[in-house]
Image (spheres, coloured by chain):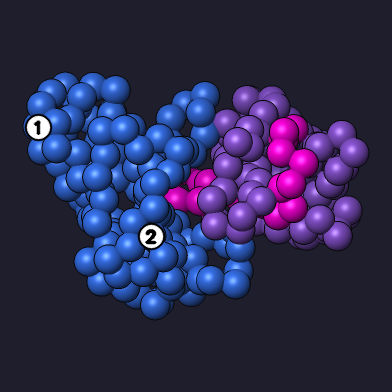
């Protein structure tokens, strides 16, 4: 079955700096990809979705890149701020219902 | 905004104890899920359901039972709890046709002594 490897497990950046989280998946049939954000004491919230036909997707202050050739998905925060401090998870699925999550990245943004 | 409510939020039991975690969603979503979250593993799917009376096996089902009694309610049952089941459990729901777009509850922290 699908396996998703997420790196790094911990990431600490200064406010205004960029931050990159990378996920590598194994199932070439996966075609739905997601980034979730988990704030302290809360459940996960959907941050961004990327489908197989989309290679770049931009949100508020971040960019998601999907490289199907290398089976990699990345989340790039262009100018981190303290409100971005959270745990980030990538996820992939080929069925649409059974998501496989990465291990998570704890991001801390300091002043 | 989808609302998913879990109870209890914190539970402590002893090895061999009986635990039921409850989840209710109020947006008529078809799918409901139970995940466990552990450091170094991310979230792993235990069981899920696409409607009342239906149950699908997830990726880590051993030691867990689940039951979907209504469209709104999904229960996770640990009949002989073990310390390895100490974890943070999340319930989530989604609508058919919106793959991967899950709405999560706030989690239930279970400690098995």
Disc 1: CA contacts within 10 A as few (<14), some (14-19) or many (>=20): some
Please tell me whether mark 1 sits on a helix, a strand or a loop. Answer: loop
Q: CA distance from mark 1 to mark 2?
A: 25 Å
Tell me which chain appears purple: A
Left or right: where B70 falls relative to B44: left
**Which residue is at the front of the view, B9 or A71?**
A71
Please tell me whether mark 2 sits on a helix, a strand or a loop. Answer: strand
Q: Residue at x 23, y 30 (%)?
A: B111
Q: Is residue A40 magenta?
A: yes
Q: Colour of chain B?
A: blue
Q: Residue at x 37, y 64 (%)?
A: B4
Please report the bounds of the magenta region as a residue range.
Answer: A24-44
Tell me: residue A8, above or below residue A86: above
**Which residue is at the front of the view, A98 or A21?**
A98
**Quadrant showing the N terminus of chain A:** top right
Q: Which residue is mark 2?
A: B49
**Residues at discs 1 and 2 in contact (Cβ within 8 Å):** no
Q: In the drawing, what numbered circle is on residue A16?
A: none
Q: Which residue is mark 1?
A: B17
Left or right: where B66 falls relative to A35: left
Q: Residue at x 90, y 39 (%)?
A: A69
């Amino acid at each position: 079955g699908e396996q998703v490897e997420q790196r790094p497990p911990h990431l600490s950046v200064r406010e205004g700096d960029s931050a990159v989280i990378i996920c590598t998946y194994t199932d070439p049939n996966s075609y739905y990809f997601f980034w979730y954000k988990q704030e302290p004491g809360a459940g996960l919230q959907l941050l961004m979705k990327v489908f197989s036909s989309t290679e770049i997707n931009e949100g508020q202050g971040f960019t998601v890149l999907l490289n199907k050739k290398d089976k990699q998905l990345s989340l790039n925060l262009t100018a981190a701020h303290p409100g971005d401090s959270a745990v980030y998870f990538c996820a992939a699925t080929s069925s649409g219902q059974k998501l496989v999550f990465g291990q998570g990245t704890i991001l801390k943004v300091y002043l | 905004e989808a609302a998913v409510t879990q109870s209890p939020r914190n539970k402590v039991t002893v090895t061999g104890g009986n635990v039921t975690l409850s989840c209710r969603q109020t947006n008529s979503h078809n799918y409901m899920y139970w995940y466990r979250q552990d450091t170094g593993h991310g979230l792993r799917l235990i069981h899920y359901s696409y409607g009342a009376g239906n149950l699908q096996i997830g990726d880590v089902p051993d030691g867990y039972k689940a039951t979907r009694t209504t469209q709104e309610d999904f229960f996770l049952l640990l009949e002989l709890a073990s310390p390895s089941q100490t974890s943070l459990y999340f319930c989530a729901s989604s609508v058919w046709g919106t793959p991967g777009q899950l709405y999560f509850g706030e989690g239930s922290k279970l400690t098995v002594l």
